[in-house]
Amino acid sequence: MTWEFNFREFDQISDMKKVSSLDSFLKNKGFDFEKLRSHGIKPKEFGRLFLPILQSGVIQRWITFHGFYDIGYLMKLVQIRFMPTSMATFATTAQRLLGTVTDLKHMARYCDGLLDDNLGLKKLAKLLGVNRIGTAHFAGSDSLLTASVYAKMKTIFKLPEQLSEGILYGLPHPIRAFRQPVTIVSPSPSSRCLVSSFSRSSPIFIGDFLIIG
């Protein structure tokens, strides 16, 4: 299951001045820009309602495909105080806001037979034998396909965590949840030990996006 949200403040006239072909492409796919302007969700309202979910820690992982702009747009939606001005700051901000981000296009680099990441989501799904549900280029369908492809890649390739988790394609800095040491004390003084536990500063989302709870 996926949820798809459509926002009202996108203006194809001003936002897509020089890409009329994209305008026609989206309309042919079924996008009704006029309807969205009157019935779509206000981005600020969505951000206000989504932020508590983001901060609750209930989201376990964020998966995306070539998701640099997706993550940036999410930051804008939840209205962070300052947009990052460098790649390092972008990674740090995303890590604190989201936790761990995984990008399938980055993972494909290390998977035999996946063209060294030189492919799109549709081609990647085809190579792995994953079928789409719904219409391409709609966020809900793309998100579900992204999650299905991620599950198949994890099953087939079994990549080590340092190669598959916490890397956004095109970003040289990792986006991983913090690991903090936790002291566990038992009634017996000799039983005190130090263990490493997984501590998230915030939740995680999946890409176009898709959320795994």
Image: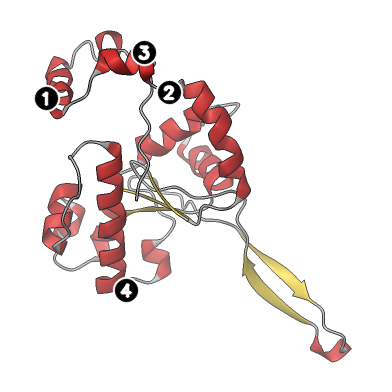
- How many neighbours does mark 2 have within 10 angstroms: few (below 14), some (14-19), or many (20 or more)? some
Question: Considering the numbered disc 2 on the image, is that residue within a helix, a strand or a loop?
Answer: loop
Of residue 31 and residue 170, the one placed in the foreground of this image is 31
Residue 68 appears in which quarter of the rendering? Answer: top left
Type of residue at label 1?
Asn
Disc 3 target residue: 38
Depicted 107 relative to depicted 18: above or below: below
Callouts 4 and 2 close, C-beta under 8 Å: no
Disc 2 target residue: 41
Q: Which mark is residue 158?
A: 4
Instruction: Give whichever of discs 4 and 3 has the lower sequence position.
Output: 3
Residue at mark 4 to residue at mark 3: CA–CA distance: 46 Å
Instruction: Give whichever of discs 4 and 1 has the lower sequence position.
Output: 1
Residue at mark 2 to residue at mark 1: CA–CA distance: 22 Å
Q: Residue at x 68, y 76 (%)?
A: 195
Residue 202 at what x, y percent from top left? 59, 48
Residue at mark 4 to residue at mark 2: CA–CA distance: 39 Å
Instruction: Give whichever of discs 4 and 2 has the lower sequence position.
Output: 2
Disc 1 target residue: 28
Q: Residue at x 17, y 18 (%)?
A: 23
Type of residue at label 4?
Lys
Residue 130 at what x, y percent from top left? 17, 59
Instruction: Give whichever of discs 1 and 3 has the lower sequence position.
Output: 1
Question: Considering the numbered disc 4 on the image, is that residue within a helix, a strand or a loop?
Answer: loop
Type of residue at label 3?
Ser
